[in-house]
Image: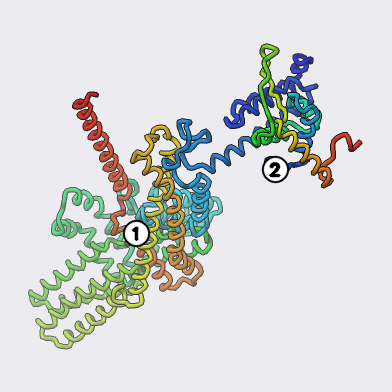
């Protein structure tokens, strides 16, 4: 296991959303829509994950002139495994449930 | 996505504008994340979502600013979040060792100590001693507030107090009139208020009223006599008059001589100082928060009859007695001396200020010394014994009043003097440490690039100042407050006492204990002039050093052009 950190429910939800399509780049707004986490909480989480090298980021090429480039995120290769482990452990502790299982 | 239409709604436009504003002030270290958040705003589904996204962005902005501020506080003065002032990596040897947070906490603690009621009192009092008898601006404002309130409430005592303590003599005159109009018993204020010869000379009509209202008292006569000759004396003093010319000018003034004769013959010497003190005590008891500096300034401003004039008239009378003795008119000489002695006794027994009593005793002593000579010449052993006994009594009174001859008071004065030295030392250290703190921090924070010359002497000096001046300031403030405690107790005891003369003396001893140090440090009446004199000298020295350095450099570059 890599760098272990204390993860909040919101961070686990973000990791879960990022693991949905592990290799695929995702936008901040779509992550917010998927997890229901507001932008003011989501971006500090993304920033922390990036600092820990769990998250890979890049700027999208400008498609529409006049509009700013969008930022893209995905979990790094090693972080995917750690994230799954963390989610499993959190579920075992009954600390967190995946969004779909609540229904 | 229908972004353009959606963005037209006023709330969405407003949300976008707010986010743009935040982006302009976003901290550098997290700015890309702010841009990332802002870039998503066009993707929001509706105006509500746009506003929600924008509000989240503002929250993120707030957190970023806070964390940046905390990170900035953890760095030493002069360091920026991006590394050294030039943006390079931080070299810890060229920065202070303590963080900004430490410095801020230490300065806050020092400020809190001085904001405490005891701290404020210590500051006001010690500042008062530095200004000697010049009333501070804050004291003058406080006094004016009291005067305005007293005018509104028709409070005669408070008006009289404000009149006697007012720095502006014209205002003092107006307040005096108002107080006496409300309570005619306060007419003595005419004889107690200090006047300015230039703007507010003593008014003879007011002193005449006082003479009528207080018959038999020598003080109004003496004040009237002073008022009469003051303009003439001021001109003569300006022209460098000596003591002999002074005396001759007084002797040639028949009105003055008549008034002095009358004063010496009056049955009472009722000092207004006692009434002034009583009024001050009454007011201070009502206004517990009144600073000691205001109270003591008011008392120190009391207008006494000119003691030099009293002494000179005494000498004139004794000279007259001597002439009478030499002419063989022993009875005339004896009567003249008895009159002078009686006046001295009345003055010494008046219960006025110490120096009024002392001058009374000096007058009596002069009269009795001459009486002793007269008794010897007239071969009257009985009179000689009486005069000798009187001289012994006078000497005993002198010793009781004189501080040095009163062991208990002498010890107390000495203790206050030493404690005063401690207070003043800590006070000066506080000022120096505050200047050092300001200089160190400002040099590092405002001119980081200027001082960047890595290990230059000025940079090292600024770092030492930024590291050590704030803790020194805190220690100095604590020491200042602790050393002021005996003076605080003296003030408190005076306020809570039943105002015996002993309490007054204790307070005065405490005050003089503080004052004596500043006098010996030459921070007296012209403290402001001296301060600017030192500043000018210091700046001139800096200028000379800069010019000298420039000349040396120019010469060096001329001899070594490479």
**Which residue is drawn at the image coordinates 25% and 37% (left, top)?**
B545
User: Mark 2, mark 1: which one is toward the viewer?
Assistant: 2
Residue annotated with mark 1: B303
Residue annotated with mark 2: A4
Q: Which mark is residue B171?
A: none
**Which residue is drawn at the image coordinates 17% and 78% (left, top)?**
B371
Left or right position of B288 against B233: right
* Pick the front one: A67 or B443: A67
Left or right position of B468 against B531: right
Chain under numbered label 2: A
Q: Is residue B328 visible?
A: yes
Residue positioned most to the top: A65
Chain under numbered label 1: B
Q: Quadrant of the N terminus of chain B?
A: top right
Instruction: Indicate the secondary structure of the residue bearing disc 2.
Output: loop
Left or right position of B187 against A6: left
């Amino acid at each position: 296991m890599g760098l272990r950190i204390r993860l909040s429910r919101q961070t686990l939800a973000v990791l879960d959303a990022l693991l949905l399509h592990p290799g695929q780049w995702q936008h901040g707004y779509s992550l917010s829509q998927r997890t229901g986490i507001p932008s003011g909480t989501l971006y500090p989480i993304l920033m922390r994950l990036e600092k820990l090298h769990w998250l890979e980021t890049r700027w999208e090429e400008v498609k529409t002139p006049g509009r700013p480039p969008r930022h893209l995120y995905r979990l790094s290769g090693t972080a995917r495994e750690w994230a799954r482990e963390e989610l499993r452990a959190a579920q075992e502790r009954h600390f967190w449930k995946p969004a779909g299982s609540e229904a | 996505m229908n972004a353009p239409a959606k963005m037209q709604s006023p709330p969405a436009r407003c949300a976008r504008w707010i986010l743009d504003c935040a982006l302009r002030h976003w901290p550098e270290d997290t700015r890309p994340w702010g841009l990332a958040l802002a870039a998503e705003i066009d993707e929001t589904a509706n105006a509500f979502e746009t506003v929600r996204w924008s509000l989240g962005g503002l929250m993120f902005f707030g957190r970023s600013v806070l964390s940046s501020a905390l990170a900035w506080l953890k760095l030493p003065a002069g360091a920026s979040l991006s590394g050294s002032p030039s943006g390079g990596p931080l070299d810890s040897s060229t920065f202070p060792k303590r963080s900004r947070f430490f410095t801020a906490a230490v300065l806050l603690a020092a400020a809190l100590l001085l904001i405490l009621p005891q701290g404020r009192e210590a500051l006001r009092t010690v500042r008062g001693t530095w200004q000697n008898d010049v009333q501070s601006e804050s004291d003058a404002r406080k006094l004016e507030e009291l005067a305005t309130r007293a005018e509104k409430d028709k409070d005669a005592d408070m008006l009289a107090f404000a009149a006697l303590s007012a720095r502006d003599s014209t205002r003092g005159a107006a307040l005096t009139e108002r107080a006496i109009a409300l309570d005619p018993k306060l007419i003595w204020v005419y004889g107690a208020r200090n006047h300015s010869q230039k703007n507010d000379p003593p008014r003879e009509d007011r002193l005449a009223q006082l003479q009528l209202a207080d018959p038999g008292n020598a003080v109004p006569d003496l004040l009237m006599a002073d008022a009469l000759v003051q303009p003439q004396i001021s001109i003569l003093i300006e022209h460098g008059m000596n003591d002999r010319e002074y005396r001759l000018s007084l002797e040639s003034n028949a009105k003055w001589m008549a008034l002095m004769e009358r004063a010496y013959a009056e049955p009472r010497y009722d000092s207004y100082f006692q009434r002034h003190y009583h009024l001050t005590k009454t007011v201070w008891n009502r206004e517990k928060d009144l600073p000691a500096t205001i109270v003591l300034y008011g008392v120190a401003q009391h207008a006494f009859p000119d003691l030099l004039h009293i002494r000179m008239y005494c000498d004139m009378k004794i000279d007259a007695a001597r002439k009478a003795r030499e002419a063989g008119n022993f009875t005339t000489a004896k009567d003249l001396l008895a009159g002078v002695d009686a006046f001295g006794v009345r003055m010494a027994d008046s219960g006025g200020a110490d120096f009024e009593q002392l001058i009374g005793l000096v007058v009596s002593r002069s009269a009795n010394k001459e009486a002793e000579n007269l008794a010897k010449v007239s071969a009257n052993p009985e009179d000689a014994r009486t005069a000798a006994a009187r001289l012994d009594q006078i000497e005993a009174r002198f010793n009781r009043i004189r501080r040095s001859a009163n062991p208990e008071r002498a010890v107390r004065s000495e203790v206050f003097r030493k404690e005063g030295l401690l207070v003043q030392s800590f006070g000066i250290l506080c000022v120096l440490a505050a200047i050092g703190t300001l200089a160190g921090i400002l040099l590092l924070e405002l001119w980081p690039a200027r001082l960047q010359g890595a290990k230059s002497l000025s940079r090292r000096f600024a770092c030492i100042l930024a590291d050590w001046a704030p803790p020194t300031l805190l220690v100095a403030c604590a020491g200042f407050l602790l050393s002021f405690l005996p003076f605080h107790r003296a003030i408190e005891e005076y306020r809570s006492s039943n105002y015996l003369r002993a309490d007054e003396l204790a307070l005065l001893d405490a005050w003089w204990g503080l004052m004596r140090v500043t006098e010996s440090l030459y921070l007296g009446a012209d403290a402001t002039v001296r301060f600017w004199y030192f500043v000018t000298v210091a700046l001139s020295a800096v200028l000379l050093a800069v010019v000298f350095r420039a000349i040396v450099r120019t010469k060096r570059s001329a001899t070594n052009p490479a």
